Image: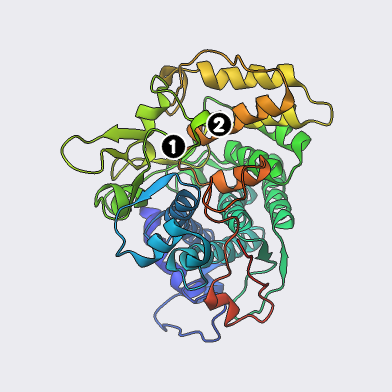
Amino acid sequence: MKPIVKYIFLLAAGSSMMVGCKKNFENPNDATQTQTLSSAVGLTGVAVGVQKAYSTSRAGSLYNLVCANGFSTFELSNRNTGNVDETNLFNGGISVDGNNAVLGNLWASNLKVIYDADNVINNAAKLGDKSYASGLIGYASIFKALALGSLAEFWEKVPDTVAVGNTANFIDRNVAYGKAVAVLDRALATIAANPISTSFISNIPAGIEIPNTLQALKARYSLFAGNYSVALTAANAVNLTVKSEMRFDAVSPNPIFNVSTATNNVFQVRDSTFGLPVALRPVMSDKRVNFYMSINTAAAPRWRINGFGAALSTAWPIYLPSEMTLIKAECYARASTPDLGNAVTELNKILTKTPAGDPFGIGADQPVYSGANTQADILTEIYRNRCIELYMQGWKMEDMRRFGRSNTPGVEKNRNFYPYPFRERDNNPNTPTDPTF
């Protein structure tokens, strides 16, 4: 592990406070917040801590993103009814309330990521070494955008600002997606003016390719906001041969493996149906089934997590290159003048791709699209492949809304949006009314 990780502990000065808390218990032996946020070393420590807060532990953003989305969209099966919060998400409907710990953790961890990332972004701009600063800004902007995107996917409205002790106003979720894109655009402009220094790259955890990731997330959140031309341009700017991933080890293990795969006590994959209705399920010859799932013949359940939750040190992609191809297909299909020919061309790249042709080893190895050449039918096939290709990535709830999938409770999903955590409602009078479903 890189020596810079020791500076994670400087986070105590700037982010150990709960967002919204009224008190600050300072340790006189710690560096002050001003000291931490005024040096490249201190800011790098905070930035590395942002990745750690997002990606590791049961309380982090990544685990709760996968868990909440998976239970609500039928991707995952519940393994233990004694896990009350997970079971309530699995049951859906009115079983999900503001006291749900999974949702509370998802909310709080993303707010913490935004708060810490803002500290890095705002203070890095003051550094004299602009190339090192651009690395800090780009790196922190990735996690701020991910956090904003996660909140906007699950809640109808999102806090406009995140600060210690504030009672934030709320903005519409589509505005939050726009804010995420604006964060990414500022980072891309900063890097274009001052390319990231190699010294910065050597001081952060390996695995994240910053410029490509900024473009990929811009493509994702522009798509979610309905800005198809922007999404298409950004997706075309991504190098599809490059991987960008969060890596894990024994000290910071893969949270999906650590909590669920290894214990078989929280959730597992549903089965080879991917939780899809009959007409959309993959055939068993689709090689993505074996990528994301394994078979256990010795003990129940038969279908087990594979793919990006397979082992303690399995890396988790921030985006999949194939996500960009599917974004292109959807943008062509949804253009003001639909370009169905190019939409099918991009879709066929996903259908015919073999595991050997993908940086992460994901490949359907199936025949080309042979359905009707209508916008509706092509979009349905794009949706089907998003559900399979991007399985357990955490974006299916957003996809279901965008593709107009059933809003009948229990048919294809058991929630459409989530209630606001009680911890927010109890401390912020601006908290919106909860959705009915």
Assess whether mark 2 and mark 1 are in contact (beta carbons under 8 angstroms): no
User: Residue 416: which numbered mark, if any?
Assistant: none
- From the viewer's perspective, tell me whether residue 179 is left or right of residue 267: right
Residue in the image at 56% along x and 41% along y: 210
| Occupied quadrant, residue 162 | bottom right
Query: Is 266 placed left or right of 214 in the picture?
Result: left
Q: How many marks?
A: 2
Please, which colouring scheme is shown? rainbow
Choose between 294 and 246: the one closer to the eye: 294
**Residue 57: percent from the left, percent from the top?**
37, 59
Q: Residue at x 25, y 48 (%)?
A: 262
Q: Position of residue 90 (x, y in %)?
A: 43, 56
Say the numbered circle drawn on residue 274.
1
For label 1, the SS is loop
Q: Amino acid at mark 2?
A: Arg
* Residue 91 position (above or below residue 355): below
- The amino acid pointed to by label 1 is Phe
Q: Which residue, given by chain and number where applicable, does mark 2 sit on?
A: 384
